[in-house]
Image (spheres, rainbow, N blue to C red):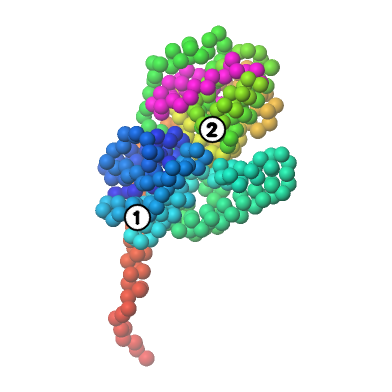
Amino acid sequence: MRIAMMTNNYKPFVGGVPISIERLADSLRDLGHSVYVFAPDYKSPVDDDEYTFRFPTMKHKIAGAIPIPNLIYGYVKNAISTLDIDLIHVHHPVMIGNVATRIGKEFHIPVVFTYHTRYEQYLHYLTPFGYLQNKANQGNLLGESILDFAQRQVIQRYLNHFLEKCDMVFAPTESIQNYLKPFHIDTPISIAPTGLPPACFENHIEATAIRKKYLQKKQYLFCTVSRLAKEKNLSFLLRGVSAVKKQLGDVFNVLILGDGPEKENLIALSQTLKIEENVFFIGEVSNHKISAYHQACDLFLFSSKSETQGIVLLEAMAAYLPVFAIRATGVSDVVVNGENGVLSSDSITEWADNLISILKNPAVLIKMRSSARTTALLYDEKSIANQILESYAYLKKSYEAEHWLMMHLNRTSYPVLAKEY
């Protein structure tokens, strides 16, 4: 098959969506299919291959990271017209999403959409909604009401309209599939998680040096991998870590891998909480090196409540690393409480008590390491790619049959059938 992936963010941007696209594209190519990626031009050097098309963008960006497309319909249309595409797989419902559905309709190409993001939890990146969010956080009831209306009505209505224009929707997890059911769309919804490449399961000799460098003279080394942004709830993680330190003492260090707009605020918070000597902000780490950090640690901490699938949780589990996370959509699909990790509420007190309980039961922690690895093995990227291919093939066949039928129904003349009276 010849597949066009379309996205509003891609490498060099670091995030779950670019990772998901790159892994799926690579796996499909390994299986003999042609995959073309349409992504924004970040106006910075990047090592692209011949299958990557960079559409023009404006100077300004959303949230300082996502480029705004600049009159891209003609560019994408011209490229698609030369590629003989069988299927479009779009990864965002706005900007490139509208281009994808329009081109799909014009060229009679089926369009698949993956619901990667809980969009209502990212409204604060848009200036008016960011203002309302701040007001709501301060207890302003009017701001809270308007924000709630925007989340429940404006966002959902737009998504309803967009999803109905797609021919199939992929939900990364069962909980997101259930989340979409109240939308009452006719478009079929299938589950298609992001797979894990072989590199996630490999041993890394650097792990020993990393552990020695950051464990120092402590007993435990924890880590988390996250974009440093408000929706990732890392301030909660720091407050939880502070509460644990007050009870257990100075017995652990924490590695925070990733970068983002909240970095300086989080560093300042760690200083306020007097845990700055326990928390190391590592910065961005390339995908192939993250596993080494996982293998150096004893437990993976996760505080986000905005995930649709939690790719980073599975990557940690692939390195035999149990996960300690807040119970939320996307997270609960992966973490089985007491088996491959532990789920907690978003109460600081309960979170701290649960973490302390884990550390006081090393035998349980060892058992969870094995279960974590077993869970990760279920997400081999080749197996996931084959499952997605089955959905692609089914959709393409159904779409062609429907298109053939519509063409014949729309004929201006029909054969006259003899009737008996």
Horizontal and vertical percent position of residue 238: 62, 25
Horizontal and vertical percent position of residue 154: 59, 54
Which of the labelled discs sits on residue 188, or is there none? Answer: none
Residue 370 in view (yes/no)? no
> Which residue sits furthest front?
59
Horizontal and vertical percent position of residue 116: 48, 43
Horizontal and vertical percent position of residue 350: 68, 28
Q: Earlier in the sequence, mark 1 or mark 2?
A: 1
Nearest the viewer among 371 and 227 is 227
Taking 52 as reference, is 170 left or right?
right
Nearest the viewer among 140 and 85 is 140
Q: Which residue is mark 1?
A: 74
Residue at screen point 56% across, 48% down:
179
Confirm whether the magenta stretch covers residue 309.
no
Taking 158 as reference, is 89 left or right?
left
Nearest the viewer among 141 and 91 is 141
Q: Which residue is mark 2?
A: 261
> Which residue sits furthest bottom?
421
Residue at screen point 65% across, 48% down:
147
Residue 83 in view (yes/no)? yes
Taking 325 as reference, is 80 left or right?
left
